[in-house]
Image (tube, grey):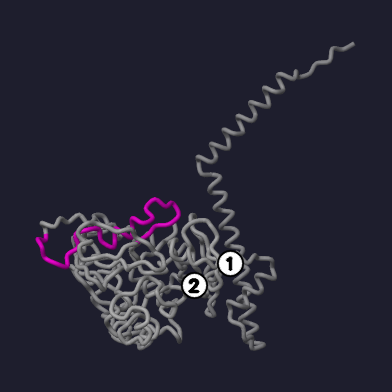
Amino acid sequence: MKERKGISLIVLVITIIIMIILAGAIILTLNNSGVIGRAEEARDKSDTSTLKEAANVAYGEWTLAKQMDGETKSADEYVKEKLKDQGFSDEDLQLVYIADTGKISIATVPEGFVVSDIEGENTVAKGLVIYEGTEKVSEDADAKTTRNQFVWIPVDISEFKREDGYSDGTKQTYVSSSTATEPYSYNTTITESNDLTGEYAEYKAMRASVEKYGGFYIGRYETGSETERTYEDTAIGTTNMAVRKDAYVYNYVGWGPSNTSTEGDVTEEAFGSSPGRNLGKGAVELSRNLYEASTSVKSTLVYGVQWDAVLKFVADNEHSIIDSTSWGNYSNNTDRTQVSPNSPAKTGAYENWKAKNIYDIAGNVREWTMEAYSTNSRSVRGGQYYNTGSFNPASSRSGYLSESFEFGIGFRLALYLV
């Protein structure tokens, strides 16, 4: 008889163990090299592309139906009904925005944030709100006062430009048209290669992100402080920041020590005891620092081009950016006596002072932006509680010395995706 040969049990076990070790090493190598991450990213992009392609087809159907049958639904309503019929989930649909002009935006939710489940906060058309953290948000007042919140601003990159003036009558005419630049370009010795504030690189990265993702996030509220700020706070750095409801406005803050310095390292001796000078960290560094550890977003002080994109998104018959009296904390707003008669209100203090879930773009305090107003000034945008809504509407722009601060000036953050 022939001798029958085969693999022994011990050899088989050893072989299996070696194969498992090799498989683990291969997976680890792929993960470290980013192959798995890139594959997941490609899958996500594919899902987004499929959704966008389906939305484009449905939009074409809406256009035809409107011409042939007098379709009365908006493009957003019509397209979302079609997408739902095709099996896209409610979670997909809440991230989609279709303007009647055909512009389609699909919001991207960054890691470390979650979309609100509260009615009126969970669609792009009404102002999609994301909350910091991963826990779901329903009708819960605590979340609004304890978690940072941002609103998605859909952007058509071809329209993503700073408004140099509003003389066409569709916006406010008080805005100066020739004195503001972005990024800072008044000092000709500062170029992209020796940029002292990092503005050139940051601006380019922000625009590239907006073009890639079709939008950005804006702070739902003016930046707030957990404690009420005083004049003395300006010289000692920062108080705890928040982008939440019912916080004190983060006022008494400068843009930075100068137009070309954002670090907030100016000593008291440098300015003597002269009042109105920023001695602590300014709005630029405070904004950048809030999410400096994040790998999904970059936080910045809002750029002027972003401010104008917000105005384009929120402006409608009820929210005029020419005369914003009706929806802001102004001296001539009849509701202010019951909210904040003689000073800035807390963040999100009054529901009528919001548009698309964004509070106090009109009124309350003027807000620092990244716009340069002159060789030594930076632009503030929006209104102020002690002026009228026609004199200082949401679209207004004026300039202050970069290191100056006062009771009626604060700032707002923006996030761009990375």
Q: Residue 192: image x %, image y %?
A: 27, 58
* Residue 351: assigned label: none
- In the image, taking residue 104 as reference, residue 376 lies left or right, namely left
- In the image, taking residue 194 as reference, residue 332 lies left or right, namely right
Q: Nearer the viewer, residue 155 or 400?
A: 400
Question: Circle 1 — which element?
Answer: helix
Q: Quadrant of the C terminus?
A: bottom left
Q: Callout 2, which amino acid?
A: Gly
Q: Earlier in the sequence, mark 2 or mark 1?
A: 1
**Residue positioned 55% across, 74% down in the render:** 98
Residue assigned mark 2: 127
Answer whether residue 103 is magenta in the image. Answer: no
Q: Residue furthest front?
A: 338
**Image position of 100 with respect to 153: above or below:** below
The reply to whether residue 402 is in sight is yes
Residue assigned mark 1: 52
**Residue positioned 10% across, 62% down in the render:** 273
Q: Residue 367: image x %, image y %?
A: 30, 71
**Magenta segment range?**
271-300
Q: Nearer the viewer, residue 87 or 385?
A: 385
Q: Residue 193: image x %, image y %?
A: 26, 55
**Which corner quadrant of the image does residue 224 belong to?**
bottom left
**Which corner quadrant of the image does residue 374 belong to?**
bottom left
Answer whether residue 276 is magenta in the image. Answer: yes
Q: Residue 59: image x %, image y %?
A: 60, 76
Rate crowding at label 2 as few (under 14), some (14 to 19) or many (20 or more) other CA atoms within 10 Å. many
**Image position of 293 with respect to 221: above or below:** above
Rate crowding at label 1 as few (under 14), some (14 to 19) or many (20 or more) other CA atoms within 10 Å. some
Q: Callout 1, which amino acid?
A: Lys
